[in-house]
Image: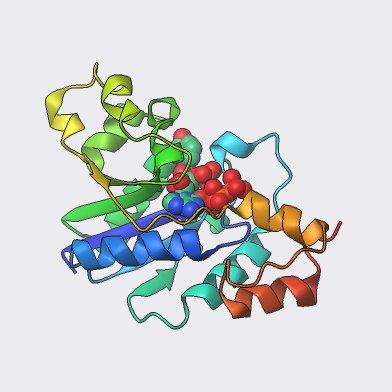
Amino acid sequence: MQEICLMGGTFDPIHYGHLVVAEEVRQQFALPKVLFIPAARPPHKTGKIISEPEHRVQMTKLATASNPYFDVSTLEVERQGLSYTVDTVKEIKNIYGVKRIYFITGADAVLEILSWKEAEQLLGMCTFIAATRPGYDLHQLADILKLLPKEVLKNIVPLEVPALSISSSDIRKRVRENKSIKYLLPESVEEYIVRTKIYQT
Ligand SMILES: Nc1ncnc2c1ncn2[C@@H]1O[C@H](COP(=O)(O)OP(=O)(O)OP(=O)(O)O)[C@@H](O)[C@H]1O
Ligand SMILES: O=C(O)c1ccc[n+]([C@@H]2O[C@H](COP(=O)([O-])O)[C@@H](O)[C@H]2O)c1
């Protein structure tokens, strides 16, 4: 395999917003695989309550099972400490020996990229696909990144994707309020949430 595409996320729970972005990137860049990597301890969410990684991995597996191009990696769950992307990209390079790594983020995440661990080194190691997301303006990106060298800047590629105003936090809130979450995420994940009652407390 020459190229691999990673999609990191908390996935608490995974929803159609994530899946649409991943499929759009896979097709537009003709990529052989998208590896979903649930973050065990997302660095920017340390003060927040997050479901156990095992639940998030299980939901991610259920959501991606029907797409032959999608796979799930538990690499960050098995690693100690915060789930820094720079560490993950280094590990993926070693495991797969690929020439090129893509990393998918939504607009909200990429707008914060300079606060990520070793951001400049990371941007030199892989190509970031910055997907549009309702409520976030990707046009601000050029301004935020203007001090970075040109060879690093070319590694961030904005991509227009079908707009889905879905978020995991809204899904969790809906469950707590006994509102329907149908059509926001795959049925298999909805069933898992109902069966395990993970968001009902
Ligand atoms: N609807 C969406 N459209 C585009 N990108 C998205 C969408 N939802 C999430 N993403 C992107 O997917 C990645 C993982 O997101 P995450 O698992 O944190 O989901 P979330 O819906 O943002 O969660 P929460 O609401 O709990 O913050 C991030 O890069 C995020 O920007
Ligand atoms: O490496 C970092 O410093 C870093 C900081 C914030 C987020 N990330 C990664 O970005 C991805 C999306 O994060 P989140 O919190 O929006 O689910 C996920 O894979 C995180 O591990 C990584």
x and y percent of residue 194 in the render? 77, 74
Q: Residue at x 37, y 59 (%)?
A: 21
Residue lying at the far left of the rendered structure: 151
Q: Is residue 100 left or right of residue 12?
A: left
188 is higher (above) or lower (below) than 52: below
56 is higher (above) or lower (below) than 121: below
Q: Residue at x 34, y 67 (%)?
A: 23
Disc count in the image?
0
Q: Which is more toward the observer, 182 or 189? A: 182
Q: Quadrant of the N terminus?
A: bottom left
x and y percent of residue 137 in the render? 38, 34
* Residue 39 visible, this angle: no
Q: Residue at x 47, y 57 (%)?
A: 164
Q: Residue at x 55, y 55 (%)?
A: 166
Q: Is residue 75 left or right of residue 93?
A: right
Residue lying at the far right of the rendered structure: 201
The image quadrant that residue 20 belongs to is bottom left
147 is higher (above) or lower (below) than 43: above
x and y percent of residue 201 in the render? 86, 56
54 is higher (above) or lower (below) than 123: below
Q: Is residue 118 left or right of residue 187?
A: left
Q: Which is more toward the observer, 135 or 17? A: 135
The colour scheme is: rainbow
* Residue 3 visible, this angle: yes
x and y percent of residue 83 in the render? 52, 44
The image quadrant that residue 51 belongs to is bottom right
Q: Which is more toward the observer, 67 or 58? A: 67
